[in-house]
Amino acid sequence: MIINLKVLCNGSFYIKVDDSITVKELHEMISEKIKTKKFYLRKENKKLLDMLDLNTYEFTQNDCVELVYIK
């Protein structure tokens, strides 16, 4: 299923992805857009694990993910 995922950060944005991609693939897509790899993703205050598919986390059509920068 294609989901319209809102990435919550200082300059929040939307990204359309298939829920069968891994969190690592999503991380790579986002890092290309924001030009840094120093972050992790979480949903409902739980860190998303790189090797799991997005559908493991039961995202809905218009869901969001929080981007947390690593210092």
Image: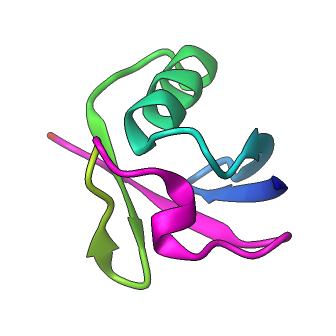
69 sits to left or right of 20? left
In this picture, is 43 found above or below 24?
Answer: below
Q: Position of residue 58 (x, y in %)?
A: 58, 76
- Pick the quarter of the image with the N terminus: bottom right
Q: What residue span does the magenta drawing correspond to? A: 51-70
Residue lying furthest bottom: 44
Q: Is residue 68 magenta?
A: yes
Q: Considering depth in this image, is 16 or 1 the residue closer to the camera?
A: 1
In this picture, is 41 found above or below 30?
Answer: below
Q: How many marks?
A: 0
Q: Position of residue 15 (x, y in %)?
A: 77, 42
Residue occupying the point 20% across, 43% down: 70
Residue occupying the point 74% across, 43% down: 18
Q: Considering depth in this image, is 28 or 56 the residue closer to the camera?
A: 56
Q: Considering depth in this image, is 41 or 53 the residue closer to the camera?
A: 53
In this picture, is 26 found above or below 2?
Answer: above
Residue occupying the point 33% across, 23% down: 37
